[in-house]
Image (cartoon, rainbow, N blue to C red):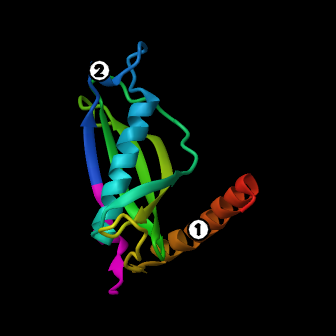
């Protein structure tokens, strides 16, 4: 299977926050931002694997800035590492005021997706081709996060 560069999985999605996306404070529901994050990450994973994928996990998501009604939520996602059938995807979410162009970091997260074959079973995803020192660092850090996720899962399930 031919390795693919992280840049080939890059997805950028922009949402204009409308009243139906927001709470009584005039900011996007956290759950809506989470949904957008999952969708952007899923598209990056599908773009890398060229296969259907399912979400396996979402690491911590901390909100740093609200996304207000009338502002844009800009999500940038890309694959950071591939582990046989699973892939880690990083999503960075920013908010932009369309009147000023000012951007602020809203949140970021790491999600894990599993590639599926036509029968819905886990299948191998193409390896990740790291092209820069930054991408190699991100992949090393992804392996540390994966080890932590697996240790936590073992502790919780006893398996």
For residue 128, above or below residue 10: below
Q: Is residue 4 above or below residue 15?
A: below
Residue 15 % position (x, y): 26, 37
Please tell me how crowded label 1 is: few (under 14), some (14-19), or many (20+) other residues with Cα within 10 Å. some
Give the label, 2 or 1, closer to the camera: 2
Q: Is residue 79 above or below residue 91?
A: below
Q: Could you tell me if residue 104 is visible in this image?
A: no
- Residue 5 position within the rendered picture, expressed as x and y whole percent measured from the top left: 34, 77
Give x and y (percent) for residue 59: 56, 50
Q: Residue at x 37, y 62 (%)?
A: 78
Q: CA distance from mark 2 to mark 1?
A: 37 Å
Q: How dense is the environment of label 2, judged by Cα within 10 Å: few (below 14), some, or many (20 and up)?
A: few
Secondary structure beneath dot 2 equals helix
User: Can see residue 44?
Assistant: yes
* Residue 154 on the magenta segment: no
Which one is nearer the viewer's eye here, 8 or 97? 8
Return the residue at label 2. Answer: 20
The quarter in which the C terminus is drawn is: bottom right
Question: Which quarter of the rendered picture does the N terminus lie within?
Answer: bottom left
Q: Residue at x 36, y 25 (%)?
A: 68
x 48%, y 42%: residue: 107
Q: Which residues are magenta?
A: 1-11
Closer to the chain start, of discs 2 and 1, is 2
**Residue 25 or residue 127, whichever sits in front:** 127
Residue 73, image x, y percentages = 33, 38
Q: Which residue is mark 1?
A: 141
Task: Choose top left, top right, bottom left or bottom right for residue 51.
Answer: bottom left
């Amino acid at each position: 299977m031919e390795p693919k560069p992280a840049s080939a999985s890059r997805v950028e999605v922009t949402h204009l926050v409308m009243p139906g996306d927001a709470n009584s404070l005039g900011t996007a529901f956290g759950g809506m931002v989470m949904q957008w994050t999952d969708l952007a990450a899923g598209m990056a994973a599908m773009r890398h694997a060229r296969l259907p994928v399912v979400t396996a996990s979402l690491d911590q998501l901390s909100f740093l800035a609200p996304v207000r009604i009338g502002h844009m939520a800009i999500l940038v996602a890309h694959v950071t590492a591939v582990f046989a059938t699973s892939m880690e995807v990083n999503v960075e979410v920013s908010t932009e005021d369309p009147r000023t162009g000012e951007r602020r970091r809203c949140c970021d997260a790491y999600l894990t997706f599993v590639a599926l074959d036509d029968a819905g079973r886990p299948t191998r995803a193409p390896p990740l081709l790291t092209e820069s020192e930054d991408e190699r660092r991100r992949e090393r850090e992804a392996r540390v996060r994966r080890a932590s996720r697996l240790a936590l899962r073992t502790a919780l399930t006893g398996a």
